[in-house]
Image: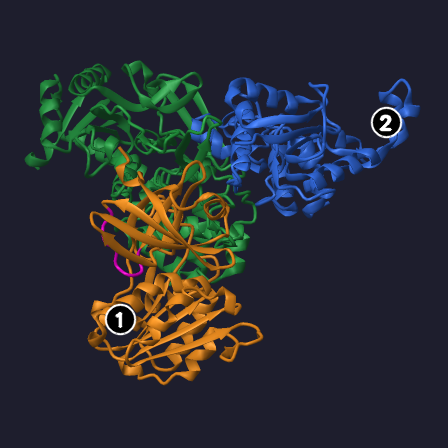
Amino acid sequence: MRRAAVAIVKLTSCSGCINEFLYTIASYPELLRSVSIVHATEFQDLNTLEDIDVALVEGSVVTQHQEELVKEVRSRARTLIAIGTCATFGGIQAGRVGEDLRKVILASYPNPDFISALPDVKSLDRVVKVDFNLSGCPVNGDALARLLVKVILGGSEVPIAESVCSECKRVGVLCVMVSRGVPCLGPVTLGGCGAICPRFGRGCYGCYGLNTTVVDGERLARFSEVLEKVGMGRGDLEAFLKYFSFSALTKIRVRE
Amino acid sequence: MGARLIPKVGRVVRVVEEAPLVRTYHIRVEDLAEPQPGQFNVLYVKGFGEVVISISNFRYEGASAIAEHTVRTVGAVTSYIQTALNVGSPIGIRGPYGRGWPLKEFEGLDVLVVGGGIGLAPLRPILKHISRYRDRYGRLMLLYGARRPVDMLYKYEYGEYRAIPNSTMLFSIDMPYIGWSDYVGFVTDLIDRVSLDPEATVAYVCGPEVMMKVAASKLVKRGLREDRIFLSLERRCRCGIGVCGTCQLGHLFVCKDGPVFSYQEVKDYLAVGGL
Amino acid sequence: MAAQLTKYFKGGLGDLRALFDAVKNYVSVVVGYRVSGDAVGFGPVESLESLPLGLEDSQAPGAYRLSRGSSGFFRHSHASPKYWLHLPVQEVFTVLEDYAVDIARYDTYSAALFGIKPCDLVSMEVLDRILKNDDSYWSRRSKIELVVVEECTVPGATCFCGSIGTGPSASTGFDIAYARLSNGIIFKYGSEKGLRILEKLELTEVSEEDVAEYERAIARAGELTRYLPPPSEISKSLERSVSDTSFWKEVSSRCVGCTNCNMVCPTCFCTEFVDQIEPSGRAKRVRQWFGCLSHTYGQVAGTHYRPELYMRYRHFVLHKFLFYPKQVGLVGCVGCGRCITWCPVGIDLREVVSKVVSRYGS
């Protein structure tokens, strides 16, 4: 059987999801029997975007060049998978949206003249048609491997939309918020991480993104009152939502 | 352990193109019990999961069973079936499950069969049953509608259905189509075009839920008894044996109490959205 | 009266230890509320020290705290016998490269449940009936050879078993029950097997005052947990409320669909299947708890039968009080209050049910 041509494309992001993909290959070396990596500027020299079966795109779109690149990738790829929360929701860099872009650039780069960023930070689905969104910061490598196998076989997957709490309770982790008063975004956040943070006694900060299948602006506003009672101020909540759920915030009604 | 949820492995022995995105798979498998008309099997495709599909025909060939399943591409599992399964492909299968159409109870009555689109699949065994035991039933009326002529199932069998003595067949499509001389409109409109003896008719209906609701209320207006109108319902069925809980409609488990219900049993539930 | 008295025995903490040891000798594994770290789960218990006897829980809508103290009284945690009998995550089978089906097998041991609560006991009866076709559940359930119940003389703030009639004392379905009182522990038996075990311990006869004190304690606890009208009144009211969309939207307006109520409910049994295909070509089918409050519940390819959250919340409530009685002849809510305590936004089922009854009651 011909190996599937997989392109790994990086936009604005930390490369953590691409690292996760490499760990995945290390855990499932047999994946290389069915996959050939035709593009991955992060870890190989010979790259082509000619004929792609599956494009794994990490990162969000913050420049004109990236917008053109991702459109080109889309036109050449049979299947496009957005991997990681930057690609699916915008990511941490969305924290700068609404700030003075020049100031942000000056604060970040020694030679700001080379930077031509757009004021907005876009998740992939705001630029191109995305076939599968796999969020997570970083993406869950096992979930990525399984989806990739399904896609290579010509199939697809309909994810079960659940909160982090479902995962917490199934593994029997004590609820950090109810039992210790630790602020936790788990109830409004998409599961998929296996409840990593609550397993270590920490509250979820929402890195898989807001569970918009249930949570609208009204419910979010009411939930923010609960968080406030246990010590998470509106400012912190807004920051977490901006970092990990930016594109969702434009889709839901947020009560002032 | 968990033996009830373990599929038997069968093989696809024939694939029939029915309509765009619809195919009938003939699956050969050992040791499968004979189903009642209206029952379903659960098909499993490796790595992609299970899907509940009605049994549209069934026969034994020696020791092995041949179950026919008409599958339309709508979700992840059905798409993969269409993409990857051909003659010779292995496929998991378990069943038969559920409560089928009550036929024996209504011998002697006229039979009205109303189908919409893919909904003809679970009704097909009724037509086969009546054709086989023709003298046990009164008139047979089949009303079948689809979106377009090309979407109609089992076209190769219509001659066989027409040949059933003392039967009427009416067809409809949703939109006008070149070469179509039968009715254009909803299949439920056809109910107005048949003469019914309300005291002596049983109706078996399957199609989209709105269509079934319209059909049932029309039939009630025509004087049919609510406990003689039967609908085959769809819900999120997973296990098929009433343990996973996801198919509940009110207090009913669609997989084990249904999928066939009398209109009387479910009309209050169907009247409330999202129950 | 004399016949009544033989039902009871009296003892102290030492006798509870002796009972635990006797039960431990009877089966391969004793299962119950188990202290692990700062939490109380549900699983195999090695010794009496692993039971939460020295812990006190305080519960309120959306709040749970554990504290230590010798006089503490423990009700329950997020966990329940469901964690042992109806596994949260379990492999169903693996399909190998050549399509051979490798059925997952589990070792099951004869087990005793020790220290479960009267509400837990009823929840098992509900699960027994609703999961009667579930051979995975029964592979574990049928191995429960002995049930020891701890009755609740000091109910918690979210408990309402007295309303449903599922507590604070145990009536049937157990072998031995005990109640901790200020001046000792009262033991009673619910089966011949239980009696035989109790007779081997060095327990004393109870006096009429002991019995009277026990009955007063149970009656007091019953009063404290009687918040709601009788279940038949609740179900009638619910039946009338079904099509009141705005009511159900209002009572579920704070819900975020997180499914904590489903997961902690000792009678919520729904499961979903997850198919994991590995790059090797093997595929695993996993079955796991699934909550009706999650969006996916009711979704099928091409449509959704419960697209809005209020519909799923309504199903949760209707199922407990209206549909369970029709399905299995028992109220599905056992009044444990877990869904109230573990709801992160503190939605109080008692309030919702009271509202339904005040609006739609006769």
Which residue is at 23% across, 52% downward?
Answer: B61
Residue B140 in the image: above or below residue B245: below
Across and down, in percent, residue C303 comes to: 51, 55
Residue C188 in the image: above or below residue A43: below
Which residue is at 23% across, 53% downward?
Answer: B60
Which of the two residues, C39 or A112, is positioned nearer the viewer here? A112
- The verdict on residue A151 being magenta is no
Rendering colour (chain A) = blue
- Residue A87, by quadrant, is top right
Q: Which residues are magenta?
A: B32-39
- Residue A2, by quadrant, is top right
Determine crowd level at label 2: few under 14, some 14-19, many 20+ residues with C-alpha closer than 10 A. Answer: few
Marks 2/1 same chain: no
Chain letter of mark 1 equals B
Rendering colour (chain C) = green
Residue B217 - label: none
Determine crowd level at label 1: few under 14, some 14-19, many 20+ residues with C-alpha closer than 10 A. Answer: some
Is the magenta region chiefly helix, strand or loop? Answer: loop
Residue A83 in the image: above or below residue B56: above
SS for tag 1?
A: helix
State the residue position of label 2. A104
The colour scheme is: by chain
The chain painted orange is B
Residue B131 - label: 1
Residue C230: tell me if it is visible. no
Which of the two residues, B199 or C284, is positioned nearer the viewer here? C284
Q: In this image, A43 relative to B78: left or right? A: right
Q: Nearer the viewer, mark 2 or mark 1?
A: 1
